[in-house]
Image (cartoon, helix red, strand yellow):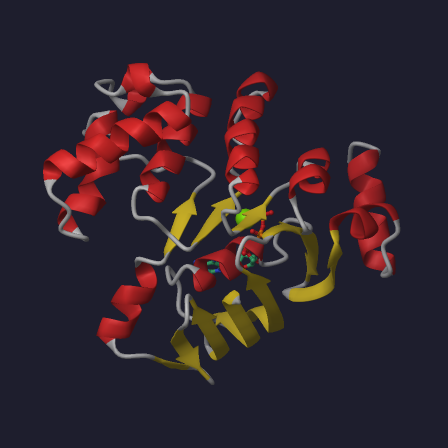
Amino acid sequence: MDILSINNLSKSFRQQQVLRDISFTVKQGEVIAVIGPSGSGKTTLLRCAAMLENADGGSIDLGGISVVESGKYADKASLKSARTKCGMVFQNFNLFPHMLVLDNIIDAPVHVLGIPRQEAVREALALLGKMEMQEYVNAYPCELSGGQQQRVAIARALALHPEILFFDEPTSALDPELTNGVLRVIRALAEEDMTMVIVTHEMDFAEKVADRIIFMADGMVVEDGPAAEVIHNPANERTKAFIAGLKSGF
Ligand SMILES: Nc1ncnc2c1ncn2[C@@H]1O[C@H](COP(=O)(O)OP(=O)(O)OP(=O)(O)O)[C@@H](O)[C@H]1O
Ligand SMILES: [Mg+2]
């Protein structure tokens, strides 16, 4: 079953076309890594898929709901229910700074989904355990390292029981040793068959965890294939050049 289906998606900012005719699907349980040079449209694509940004044209189906069809967005009620089916994890964590870790996690379940507070707390504690963060339940985000904040952000996204999780460079603001803790929890989610689309520059991680890699350039999907193939035997010259550049450290 497709959890996400994107067809002929386009998006411009003023005169600049940032997404051009993007099409791909994500099946339940699949992990997709999105790679590509800076400015190629990766963040914009994720933001459109997670309904944080409106596309100009094309279609998005998410969790069985038609979000946008030929550039026309669905009614408010459909968009609201599609929003609860996806979660987003940002490069800079975006936790609520004035709220304790626990309150960051239970806020949406209580206020958006209407889950009783006690039940939301129980689930938050379980999620924090899974993220190896249970001892920080009463800390403020500013008291945590970047890697710890990111693991809380992942717990917060999971608390809405999303059908798909989007990650935008979840480790690029982190030191290498903190990166590993975050990649470990994402890998554990993959092993539980969580459906995920992850923008990343961590190619070793992408190869181990992703089923497919999508390479974007100039707002287009240039290549979409099995992870090992895209990394070791890319079909397109631009993919080849990009991967070679990453390997040589540029
Ligand atoms: N809100 C915005 N207003 C105007 N232009 C924008 C906006 N957001 C993105 N852009 C432009 O769209 C293009 C694609 O940006 P995007 O952030 O999607 O790229 P990216 O692939 O995520 O890059 P990076 O690897 O640096 O994060 C860039 O040229 C950027 O300047
Ligand atoms: Mg980006």
- Classify residue 235 by image quadrant: bottom right
Q: Is residue 70 visible?
A: yes
Q: Where is residue 150 shown, x and y percent of the image?
A: 42, 30
Specify whether 104 is left or right of 247: left
Res 15 visible: no
**Residue at the (41%, 18%) spot, across then down:** 145
Instruction: Tell me if residue 119 comes above or below residue 82 in the rendering.
Output: above
**95 or 185: nearer the eye?**
185
**Most foreground residue, 12 or 183:** 183
Q: Quadrant of residue 109?
A: top left
Nearest to the observer: residue 147 or residue 162: 162
- Place of residue 135 in the rendered image (x, y in percent of width and height, measured from the top left): 30, 14
In the image, what residue occupies the spot 26% across and 79% down? 75
Residue 154, compared with residue 140, is above or below; it is below
Residue 113: give x, y in percent of width and height: 19, 53
Where residue 76 sits: x, y (%)?
23, 74
Q: Image point 46% across, 23% down: which residue?
A: 147
Q: Is 203 left, or right, of 193 in this rendering?
A: right
Establish if 194 lies above or below 127: below
Is 169 positioned to the left or the right of 34 in the image? left
